[in-house]
Image (spheres, rainbow, N blue to C red):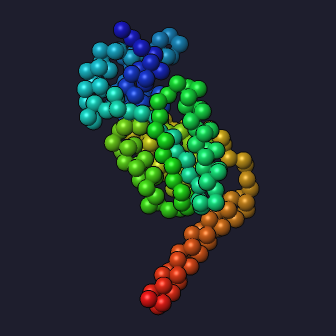
């Protein structure tokens, strides 16, 4: 039995782009191509060469993860809106999903939810990651995580593309984000010293 690239990707639990990349890397290729140039995969080869060698046979465990984040506690309403937007999207697609949320700066790499998400991706347990905006994942460094997703066969879906801000607008936003984090750390350190002195 021969399958299209979309059917093969669904069976394996990876994205179509991952199958294309595997072919370029000579890891796993289509059995042949049609006259129109469409790939056709052999089901028996998929079962013998892929499903039996994927780490821990993770295909059955792969799931959709949705990730939402805001920077501060006064943005909790925005966090709820993000979560509902993501949940509604997955429900319309009929996907089972796990919600992961964070409250913290976009340049903080120690957030509990973010580290849980990275762990799941690296264990091959995530078939797709859904975000409202790409900067919800990280303010800086999101391209690296997207590359990690691609490496582990995790499709990334961004629901709303950012507006085309000018270079100056993006630079100002980045500087404000950095200043906010360092100011919070500075005042937190002072507060700790004051409490220690009072004690």
Front residue of 11/88: it is: 88
Q: Position of residue 106 (x, y in %)?
A: 55, 58
Quarter of the image that includes the C terminus: bottom left
Residue at x 39% of width, y 17% of height? 41
Residue at far top of view: 1
Q: Is residue 115 visible?
A: yes
**Would residue 51 appear left or right of 199 to someone viewing this image?**
left
Quarter of the image that includes the N terminus: top left
Q: Position of residue 147 (x, y in %)?
A: 46, 45
**Would residue 26 appear left or right of 72 to someone viewing this image?**
left
Residue at far front of view: 199
**Would residue 51 appear left or right of 180 to someone viewing this image?**
left
Number of disc labels: 0
Query: In the displayed structure, would residue 20 be above or below residue 82?
Result: above
Front residue of 73/47: it is: 73
Q: Is residue 135 visible?
A: no
**Would residue 115 appear left or right of 188 to someone viewing this image?**
left
Q: Quadrant of residue 125?
A: top left
Query: In the displayed structure, would residue 175 be above or below residue 10?
Result: below
Q: Position of residue 182 (x, y in %)?
A: 56, 73
Front residue of 12/5: it is: 12
Q: Position of residue 105 (x, y in %)?
A: 55, 61
Q: Quadrant of residue 149?
A: top left
């Amino acid at each position: 039995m021969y399958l299209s690239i979309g059917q093969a990707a669904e069976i394996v639990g990876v994205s179509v782009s991952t199958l294309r990349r595997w072919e370029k890397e000579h890891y796993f290729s289509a059995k042949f191509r049609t006259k129109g140039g469409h790939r056709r995969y052999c089901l028996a080869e998929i079962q013998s060469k892929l499903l039996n060698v994927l780490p821990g046979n993770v295909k059955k465990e792969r799931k959709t993860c949705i990730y939402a984040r805001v920077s501060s506690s006064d943005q909790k309403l925005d966090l709820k809106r993000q979560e509902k937007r993501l949940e509604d999207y997955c429900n319309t697609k009929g996907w089972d999903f796990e919600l992961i949320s964070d409250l913290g700066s976009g340049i903080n790499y120690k957030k509990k939810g973010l580290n849980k998400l990275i762990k799941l991706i690296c264990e091959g347990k995530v078939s797709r990651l859904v975000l409202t905006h790409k900067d919800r994942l990280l303010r800086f460094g999101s391209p690296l995580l997207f590359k990690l997703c691609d490496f582990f066969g995790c499709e990334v879906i961004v629901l709303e593309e950012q507006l085309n801000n000018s270079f100056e607008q993006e630079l100002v936003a980045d500087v404000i984000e950095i200043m906010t984090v360092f100011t919070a750390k500075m005042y937190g350190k002072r507060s700790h010293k004051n409490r220690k002195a009072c004690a």
